[in-house]
Amino acid sequence: MKIKNIDVQPGDYIEVSLIKKDYRGTLLETPKDEKGIVLLKLDSGYDIGINKKDIFDIKVLKKAFEKKEEIEIKKSPQRPNIGMIITGGTIAARLNPKKGGVDWLTSPRDLFKFYPELFEKVNVVRLEVPFMKASEDMDFKDWKKIARTAAKLLNDSNIKGIIITHGTDFLHYTSAALSFFLKNLNKPVVLTYSQRSIDRASSDANLNLQCSALAAVSDIAEVMVVGHASMNDDYCYAMPGTKVRKLHTSRRDAFKVINAKPFAKIFPDKIEIISEYNIKKKGKIKLDDKFEEKVALIKIYPGQSPEILDFYLKNKYKGIILEMSGLGHVPVRARKSWIKKLKEVQKKGLIICATSQCIYGRVDPLVYSNGRELLGTGIIYLEDMLSETALVKLGWVLGHKEWAKNKEAVKEKMLENFAHELSERLDVGEVKT
Amino acid sequence: MSENKIDYEKLGLKIGLEIHQQLETGKKLFCNCPSLLRKDEPDFIIKRKLHVVPGESGEVDVAARHEAEKTKEFIYEGYNTTCLVELDESPPYKINEKALKIALQIALLLNCKVLPISQIMRKTVIDGSNTSGFQRTVVIAENGWIDSSFGKVGIQSICLEEDAARIIEKKDKEVIYRLDRLGIPLIEISTMPDIKTPLQAKQVALKIGEILRNCEVKRGIGTIRQDINLSIKGGKRVEIKGFQDVRNIERAIKIEVKRQMDLVKKGKSVGEVRNVLPDGTTNFLRPLPGAARMYPETDLTLLKISRNFLDNVKKTLPALKSELKEELRKKGLHEELIKLILKKNKIEEIKSLSLLYHDLNLIAKMLVLWPEEIAKKSGKKVNEKLNIDVLETILQLIKKGKIFPWEVKEIMIEIAKGKTLKEIEKEKLKKEKIENINFIEEKILKIIKSKPGLSINAYMGLVMNEPELKGKISGKEAMEILKRLIK
């Protein structure tokens, strides 16, 4: 970059002269939204900003130099081998204070430096980086990439299980997708995350990764999200990939199991099993990642007009999840009734499924007459399936031409339990005594 | 060797002070929880661990490593007034504007240059006293100065930062902290190493303390803490922490200088952080931290102090006591009363009352002298009854001429007894009327006695022409009195 016609690079030690005062410090990267400012790290460690227009001279005192450090990652034959897939998110991003920008942690060396405890538990023998993205930027094509990479690693007999690090925002969509895409799962597939950036000593990534390592070498052959069980740094839950949801914007125990139980409680040194799971087995896994992109998830609100469905029909959508009120209702005896429109679009081939925006509990259209009338239009009620899981599953089911061609088959598949997405019974949950 | 014989100049003694003062903002620096220390039992606990993180350039800070080598579990005690920010479970809110305002006031009173753009930083601290593993801090001003009787001392920087959690108990494998103190706004004032003697250090600390007390800062034990940086020729810089009483500073410096002289002689001086003990001696706390422990608080934008904001701060700048004294002296207030006004912190009151009436000495007596006297005599509290509104009304009555300045003390005594101003006024009028009538009768009697035997009409003419009675009596009243007296 050029300031006052002088070539300077982030990391250079410079002297900036203003009218009344000179500042010495290390030049930092200019934030994208602050083009008119030069950021300087003073010798005291504090960063200050200087308006470019106030600078009348700049001198480079010392050019930046990158220290190359060699870290040897010791492998031990006593430790089990795992594979790792890094996809981005907070858990794989570190701030580079020297430059002010963000670096991705993509090499085993970086990982080792930040997470030495992980490497005391396992050997990371394969590390794959299909892409680096914030999870809100991902879509079904990314799920497919992760699934293919995972399949490759899972079919490597040298590897006991895999850990996938991922951003938190849409992590539960990816976990649901992998649950459907990875058929005949033979080994543990662990997705994990961090809510606190890894530059801080308090980062939740440490416990999450230690517990993920234990999960990855366990006999739990499931797609699971492993993360903090509470705000304490004591143990994590291993949560079914189809029954988990991000329920808090910032807490470290952001992910909760809905309408089911975790597979296990995982401490840094032991696993306590909580519920039934598929046990690790021999054999190769089969990738089944067909996906129909033209699916949507709509949240119902009071007074909503059904004409929104015309948009989806016109744009050739194949299926829609309506996230309904309560037990599964949309406006029926209201000013803008949905009944007529629902009949019309389903007749034209659009698949309509129902989940509840209550999050907890299952839908049941039989309790109220409004529900019965809606059921009569042909809507598929998805029991206790989470809306996010339902969207992914609908895309996956409709991606299979042999199922998609008739509605009865779609209904049958949507209500078939492939990966714990439907619970046979609902637990009472926490009971206050 | 006696203390007096140490030639500090020859030793090349350099001392810098670091003063930490809690600000009175009501809320915390980066969340809206009350900034209150609680005495009751905590409502919940959270268990955490901290991990050493490589800082910039991948190095682990020496101070951070020292702390981490003692891997521990941290127990945090929280209250119903604790929020997710304090638990490191939510990003910080915007910086508290009142704290920023007070910090800028202090910076200006210390003649500092305010930095228009600064970045809120994270200072790595992993002894567990911060749930996040760092302390948020921002430099807001620098390059100031303060006068001492030994010469000017430079102010290096003014930072605004979060206070740490309170340590409750240190066990072998766990440390218990309480979260009520975490996040209370704190100002850090660092002087240049311009201080040359232990006595000067104490003086500068007292002077800065006086300036701070002019602003909205917390009062009482633990709300202000002093650290000292010192070095002598040939030795390394040592930081001494934990002064809660400014009187300890002088003694501790003298002791540490002697220790340093000894170490320098042996070639064994090392830079380190030491902790002061009540007797003025110190013990090792941890190695000196490096600049590697600072990196930006990425959850917040750059802190920009607009000209507008700064102008507003300037407008509300509290005057320093030394300046106030001069101002009051110029207005003619007696020295003793000035002292009392400052001691009892009635500056705002005297200012507002002086707008109503010119006599500052009277106002000062009403504020700081008489209420105490009255309370002492009656053995009752009078502050409530003699509040500022009552004093204001009294001054307004003087101005209207309804009461006289020499009556004020009496009136205040009556008010303290429970009478209202209205009642006092009525009584006063009644009394005046009676006094008036007595005066007139005496005068008329004098006229009669001086010229006996005249007719009533002749007396009437004399009375009405008497200059001292002019306007005080009507003809009808005069006639009635004459009739009564002549009978």
Image (cartoon, rainbow, N blue to C red):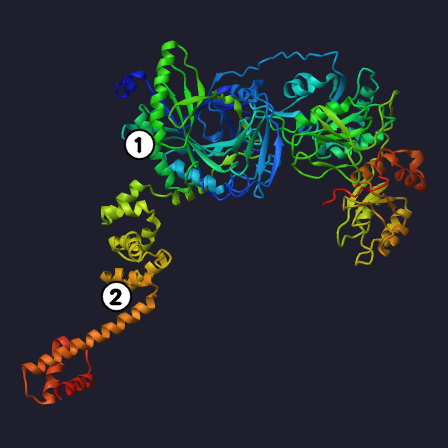
Quarter where residue A352 is shown = top right
Instruction: Give the x, y percent position of residue A339.
Output: 86, 54
Position of the C terminus of chain A by quadrant: top right
Q: Amino acid at mark 2?
A: Gly
Estimate the spatial distance between the alpha carbons at disc 2 and disc 1, rounded to whole Å. 47 Å
Residue B86 vertical placement versus B412 (above, below): above
Instruction: Read off the residue under disc 2.
Output: B401
Categorize mark 2 by other alpha carbons within 10 Å: few (<14), some (14-19), many (20+). few
**Residue A33, quarter of picture:** top right
Q: Nearer the viewer, residue B412 or A432?
A: A432
Residue drawn at x 12%, y 87% is B486
Q: Amino acid at mark 1?
A: Asp
Residue B243 in the image: x percent, y percent?
A: 40, 30
Q: At x 94% / y 42%, what residue is drawn?
A: A408
Q: Disc 2: which chain?
A: B
- SS class, disc 2: loop
Chain containing the residue with disc 1: B
| Direction from residue A307 to residue A57 in the image, left or right | left
**Number of other residues with Cα within 10 Å of mark 1, as a class: few under 14, some 14 to 19, many 20 or more:** some
Q: In this view, which residue lies farthest toward the top?
A: B266
Residue behind mark 1: B147
Determine if residue B103 is in view.
yes
Left or right of residue B295, residue B264 in this image: left
Q: Is residue B261 above or below residue A347?
A: above
- Co-location on one chain, circles 2 and 1: yes
User: Relative to the observer, which residue lies in front, A309 or B258?
Assistant: B258
Looking at the picture, does residue A365 appear above or below residue A19?
A: below
Question: Which x, y percent locates residue B70?
Answer: 57, 21
The answer, for residue B193, to whether it is visible in the render is no
Quadrant in the picture for the N terminus of chain A? top right
Q: Please say if the residues under marks 2 and 1 sit with CB atoms less than 8 Å apart.
A: no
